Structure formats: structure tokens, C-alpha cells
Amino acid sequence: MTNLDLIERDLEVLWHPCTQMKDHEQLPPIPIRSGRGVWLEDFDGKRYLDAISSWWVNLFGHNNPHINAALRDQLERLEHVMLAGFTHEPALQLAERLVQISPAGLTRCFYADNGSSAVEVALKMSYHYWRNVGKPRKTRFIGLENGYHGETLGALAAGSVPLYRQIYAPLLMDVITVPSPDAFNREAGESWADCAHRRFAKMEEALARHGDEVCGVIIEPLVQCAGGMRMYDPVYLNLLRDACERHGVHLIADEIAVGFGRTGTLFACEQAGISPDFLCLAKGLTGGYLPLSAVLTTEAVYAAFYDDYANLNAFLHSHSYTGNPLGCRAALATLDLFERDDVLGRNLRLAEAMRNATAHFAEHSHIAEVRQTGMILAVELVKDKAAREPYPWQERRGLIVYRHALKRGVLLRPLGNVLYFMPPYVITPDEIELLAEVALEGIQLATAE
């Protein structure tokens, strides 16, 4: 079996996600035969360093022995049973552990299949809560500019990245959008915290004006990932938590991409010392092995649905594979690794290695900013550094970096003109140096004309 064999078969039947399939006429998909650690290998024996954790899901490397062993054991016991009217040990154990390690006050765990589904659960649960407690006028949500929460219709409505949202706008609910605290857009001499304070004024204004009709505010804490890895100061979370309480709306924290150590703490909300009303988790939850998501919420929310059946206040949202035992067991094995090893301590050292390896990038005439939050590092390419004028998106400068990196055996998948590192936590300092070297070569090619 060769790469070519699989490419020909693939292009006959598959429709790939987030892809203009016509691009594959010039850049065929790469068939992957195996993976180990941070490396993927194709059918021709070429290896690729997975610098983006396969869309941000893989925390502890491909083919991780501990997670593999846990899944083999679970396969011999139970592959799946519905979670309506039944329960099983992996789902129960995982819920117990998530409640234990999550921010204080989150006592109930509701499972779904993926990140978008988790957001749908949180949005519906928030709306339904207010209906159950006698406030049916609360039907709207507030989100941030440049926010992204997934591709299903509710999640897509809550986000505001035009690339994903614009074409489907007629299908989407009306969400109030306020400016992001994104520190890239800070004024001259303004700190990240100052920018967050200034931008929060618009959120406060929206809550004061619309609080009686708003169910909740949904945000990605600290990093707006799909929106170009834009980052902001934790003080915004403090301000928002206080404002949500004052105006009687829920705070929904979408930690699907930023949870489980990615920002330097186990959960990003910890850096502000806050607890949301809903915490959405997915991606790294299973270490990148299986689709599973969870929404954690409070006892007060749970109590609003706890009623006699005849009153029809139950939350009837469901997925066929809710709480799948294999997914839950993979998640438990992932949490084992956090408990067994000093993952967060090691990540601090790896984050410093990433910072040091790219420090000289800031001198480049077409790099506006190198920014970092924990194990996420982003490099923003621009046409004019002084004016921070972006390259036209039609020029696809990031694609030049992507193609060069593949030739050099590195998987980088820029978001437009934003190049980023988001590697598995098992990467080594030497591999980080390789990433930086290959990335800078790609940047030189992408900005040469």
C-alpha cells in the first residue's frame, strides 16, 4: 500500500472537513498509516511532527501506552450502553473526577459527543433554566466578536467569525455581539489588562441594556482559538463574572480548546479565580482518542429541572452515544496522566522553550506580533508591520507556510495569516527548535514577495 493508492481511493469517495476539495488537485491529502508520540507517519514512510495536536485534541502523543491499555481493558468489558435509564462505571467515575477538578460550584455533569454539541447543550440548558424558573423573556445570548464555538447552528450563531458564519446567517438565532478584549488591538502604550478593562465597557453596556432578555454570555476564556489565536488578560473574566451576577445572566465558559492544561492551568478560568455557570469541555478530554464532550453546571441549574414528570420540565436533549464507555475510559486514562505526572510543571518549561525558540521572530519585518498563553503560541503575519495591515486573505500566505512545513516533515496548519504552535505535551525542546526553524523558513517564503 502506498500514499498514491489511498489518495486515489480517497478522492473518489471522501469529502474532507474545512476544505475546498478543489485544492486537492494541487495538494493531495496525506494518508497516515501510524502515529507515535508527536510524530505521524504516512504510507511511504515519511514522518510529520504534529505541531497542532491534530486540531488541538492530542495531549499526550499518538499511540499513548497508558490510554491504549485502558481502552483495551474497556473493550473486554463494555463497548456501549445507552445512558438513559442505565449507567456504567466509566461515565460515573469520569463525572466524579470532573466535578472534583473543575472550578468550585460545578456539581453536575451532562455528556455529549463533541465540542459543538456541548455548546448546544449549554445554550439550551441555560434558556430552559430561565423558562423553568419563570423568566420566559430570557431568550437571547451575548457573545464576543471573533468568537468561535462550533459548527452546529446554535454554536455557530453564538460565534462571529465571518468565514464560518456568514453564509448560514439566515438560519441562525439573533445573538448580541460585543467587542472582544483581544489584546492584539490594544492602543499604543496600553497593557493587556488595560485593553480588557476598556473593552469590557461595551459588555457592561450590553448587559445593562439587555439583561432582562439575556440567558447567558458565552466566551472562550483567554484565547479565541479559531479566530486567529487572539489572546486577552484574565481580568476580563473577573469583570464578566461579577457583571453576570449583577445582571442575572449565566456565564458559559467554552473551554473546549483551552481546557486541560493548554493555557498553563488545568482550566483557563482558574487564572481569574472564577467559576462559570456552565463549563464546556471536549477535544483534549479524551487525550485525542475518541469523541466525547461534557458540560458541567451548578446544583441550582440542576434543581430547576428536577420535577414531577407531568410538569414537563425535564431536559430532553440526548445523543445516541452519550457517555460512551470507551470515550469515558479514554478520558479517565487522560486524567490519570495529569495526576501521575507533573504535566503542568513540564508544560511551563515547554512553554518557555517555545518562547525562547521564537523570540527572534519579533524582529521580522512582516511579523506584527508573537503572542503566547501557556502551550499556545501564535505568530501574526502582516503586509505592513508599522500599520499592522494584514495581507489580503486571497493571497493565502499561510498556505505557503503549510506546504513548506509538510515538505520538511512538520504539520502546521495556519489560520489564515496566523501561524501557531499547539503541540502535544510530550514534545521535546529539540522538537520545538525544529518547529521554530521550519516555521521561520516558511515565513520567509510566504513574505518574500
Image: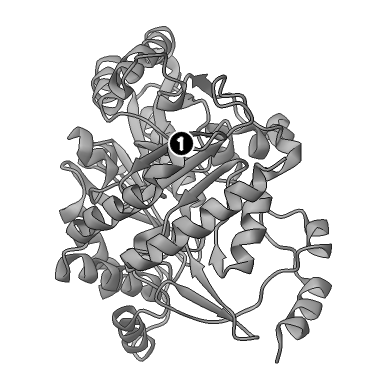
Identify residue for label 1: 363
From this view, report whether residue 398 is shown above or below residue 28. above
Q: Quadrant of residue 168?
A: top right
Residue drawn at point x = 59 percent, y = 80 percent: 46
Split into 4 quadrants, where in the image is the C terminus? top right
Q: Residue 279 appears at what percent x and percent y?
A: 32, 44
Q: Amino acid at mark 1?
A: Glu
Mark 1 residue element? helix
Q: Nearer the viewer, residue 101 or 439?
A: 439
Residue drawn at point x = 36 percent, y = 88 percent: 72
Q: Nearer the viewer, residue 54 or 79?
A: 54
From this view, report whether residue 35 is shown above or below residue 99. below
Residue drawn at point x = 58 percent, y = 45 percent: 415
Residue drawn at point x = 21 percent, y = 71 percent: 336
From this view, report whether residue 47 is shown above or below residue 392. below
Q: Residue 209 appears at what percent x and percent y?
A: 42, 7
Q: Nearer the viewer, residue 449 or 336?
A: 449
